[in-house]
Amino acid sequence: MRVAVDAMGGDNAPAIEVGGAVAACREFGISVTLVGDRTRLEEELAKHACAGLDIDIYHASEVVGMHDSASDAVRKKKNSSVRLAFELVKEGKACAAVSAGNSGATMAAGMFVLKRIKGIERPAIAQIFPTLKGQTLVLDVGGNVDCKPLHLVQFAIMGEVYARYAMGITSPSVGLLSNGEEDSKGNELTRETNSILRNASINYSGYVEGRDIFKGTVEVVVCDGFVGNVVLKSSEGLADAAGHMLKDEILKSWVSKLGYLFVRGAFSRFKKIVDYAEYGGAPLLGINGVGMICHGGSNIKAIKNAIRFAHEYAKSGVTEHVAEKLSENTSVFVQRDTPRSQAAA
Amino acid sequence: MRVAVDAMGGDNAPAIEVGGAVAACREFGISVTLVGDRTRLEEELAKHACAGLDIDIYHASEVVGMHDSASDAVRKKKNSSVRLAFELVKEGKACAAVSAGNSGATMAAGMFVLKRIKGIERPAIAQIFPTLKGQTLVLDVGGNVDCKPLHLVQFAIMGEVYARYAMGITSPSVGLLSNGEEDSKGNELTRETNSILRNASINYSGYVEGRDIFKGTVEVVVCDGFVGNVVLKSSEGLADAAGHMLKDEILKSWVSKLGYLFVRGAFSRFKKIVDYAEYGGAPLLGINGVGMICHGGSNIKAIKNAIRFAHEYAKSGVTEHVAEKLSENTSVFVQRDTPRSQAAA
C-alpha cells in the first residue's frame, strides 16, 4: 500500500518531503503519493534519480499555512494538500497520511476526513522518546489542552495498543505523568484518572514522574496535551542548549578540540540515539486510519522515517485493536457520567 | 545574620547539612545555626575543623520524614527541625531557613510559622535553570498543583521581584509557559492568566514554550506547580539519561576513551553549568521571611550554595518588595471575583 505525503506542509516544503519520499521508496521499497502542486513537485522530483521508484503525484491546489486555524483549514481549504492526503486514505488509495505542516490542522483534517474511532472522544498525538532502556511513548503531546479523565483513560488505551502492535512491545506498562509517585499526589485531573485506570484492563503502573520518561520506567506515559507539549518542547530545548554549551566548552581549548576528534564517533552515535529524525514523526491516534505528524523543521531523514513508521503503523492494525480494547473497557467508562462523590460512595 | 539549617531533613542528613554549613561558613563567612538532634550534630561537627567558625546548634527533638504529610508535619511535630528552623526566622534569630527535607512539609512549615505575605494567596517554589543566556527562574515547581489565574499572576509578580532583587537582573521579562506562542494557544488557566498579565505592571512577554526555558528567552517563566514539577523532573531525567548514554558510547572504543582524557576539562566545565548543586536550592516565595528548599539528595556543595543564596535572598529585601509590587497591581486582581463573561464585556 502507498503512503500519501502532504508535500507542501513543512518549513522547507516541498524539497524535504520529496527527498524523504525518494529515500523511503529507495531504502524501504515503500510506494509514495506526493500530494501538492503538480508543477512544483515535478520540478523537485526531476532533481532526483527516480527511475524505477514507485512515486506519483496527486495534485492539490491549496496549502494550509502555519497561521491558518485548524478549523478554517478544514472548512475553507477543501483542496489543501493535507486534507487531500487524508482523502486518499479514506478512499483506500493510501494506507497512511504523513504531514510536516501545521499540526493542529493535520489533526483536524485527519479527524474531519477519517472520523474518530467509535467511542474515542479525542484523538491524540503520541511521541516516542529515547530512554535508558529503549523507547517510551508519551501521549498526548499537543492535541488536547483541557482534558477530562475519560480522555486520559482513552489515551492510555490507545498508547498501550500502539506500543503493543506498532512498536512490538509484548506487554507494555502504562504510567500516568504526575508530580510524585504516591496516589496522594497529582492534580484533580490525574487523581480521578488514576482511580479509573486502576480498574482498566491494561498493565497500569500508577503515577510516574518526569524523570521516569527518560529512565524508561514504563513504556507508555499518559498526560494531557498541554503538559505533554511542554515536556516535549522543554526536552528539545534542553538537548539543544546542552549541545551548544558543551560545544562552547570544547572549543575553548586546543587540547579539548584535539580530544574531540577522538570522541567524535561516540558523539555521533549518541546523537543518533537522541535525534528526533530517527523516530520520524508522531503517530496520530484515535482516528479511523493512519496519520503521522512530523516536526515542521523535519529533515529528509525524518520524513523518510516517518513514511516508514506510518507504513508499519498501517500494517499493525492498531486502529482495529484500539476499537477492541475500548470495548473491553466499557465498564470503566461508566464512571464518567457519575459525579465524583457518588462514584466514591 | 545567621542562616538556620534544618540539619535532619535530607536523604543523607545530618552529614551533608553539617558539611555544607561548615563550607558556607568557611568560604563565605556566613554564620549558621544547625537545627536538629544536639548529640548527633555535635558528633558530626567534631569531624570537621571548626575552630573560629560561627556555627551553633539549636536542639530539635523531632524529624519530619519524607512520608509525613505536610499538614501532619506542621500540626503533630511541633519540635521538628524544619519547623524550629522557621521559628528562629520568626523570632529574628535567623534571617533564613534552609531545608533539604520533605519539600511539601518545608513549604507548609514556612507558611504556618511565618504566614503569607499580605495579599499572597499561595506561596510558590521557584527553581533556577541554566540557559544559553545565563539563568531563568521558573515557578511554581511543586507547591501548587491546581491553580487559579490569580495564583499564576501572583507567581509572575513574585518571580519578577526575586529576579530583580535577588538575582540582580535590571528589568526581568516574564513569560507564561504554554503550548505555543500565539494568544490563541494555552489551556483555560493560561488563557485567563495571559489576559490578566497583559495589564499587570511587569515586563510581561506573553506566552513562551518549553524550549524557551533553556534558550533563556525570558528571565522568569510562570506555570502551575504540576507543570513546573514535571518540567523540572523531566529535565533532570533527560540530563541524567543523556549523560549515561554519552558515557556508554565513549566507553565503547579505546579511541574515544583516549579522546575523553582530552575533553574531560570541557565536560567538567559543562557539568558545572548544568549542575543543580551550583544553584543550591529553590527559593520559597510568598511567605513573610526567607526559605530555601533543597533537593533531598543534595550534596555538600548544594547545601553550601543554598546557605549562600538564602543569605543573599534575605539581604535583598524581596519579601518587602513583593508586598509593594502587589499593591501596585491591586487593580489587576479585581478581575478575580468577576465572572469571565462579565470581565470580557
Image (cartoon, coloured by chain):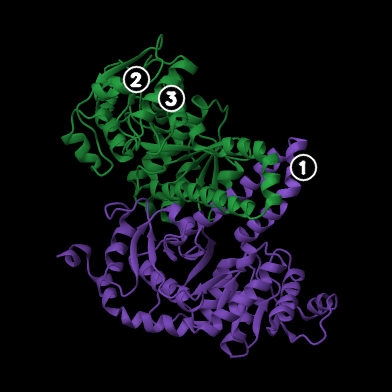
Chain colours: A green, B purple
Label disc, if present, on residue B258 of the rendered structure: 1
Q: Secondary structure at mark 1?
A: helix
Q: Name the residue type under label 2.
A: Leu
Binning the other alpha carbons within 10 Å of mark 1 as few (below 14), some (14 to 19) or many (20 upward) gives some
Binning the other alpha carbons within 10 Å of mark 3 as few (below 14), some (14 to 19) or many (20 upward) gives many
Does residue B211 appear in the picture of this structure?
yes
Real-space Cα separation, disc 3 to disc 2, in angstroms: 32 Å
Real-space Cα separation, disc 1 to disc 2, in angstroms: 46 Å
Check if mark 1 and mark 2 are on a common chain.
no
Binning the other alpha carbons within 10 Å of mark 2 as few (below 14), some (14 to 19) or many (20 upward) gives many
- Mark 3 vs mark 2, foreground winner is 2
Residue at 81% over, 78% down = B45
Q: Which residue is mark 2?
A: A45
Quarter of the image for residue A124 reads top left
Percent of width and height locating residue B129: 53, 61
| In the foreground, A247 or B96 | A247
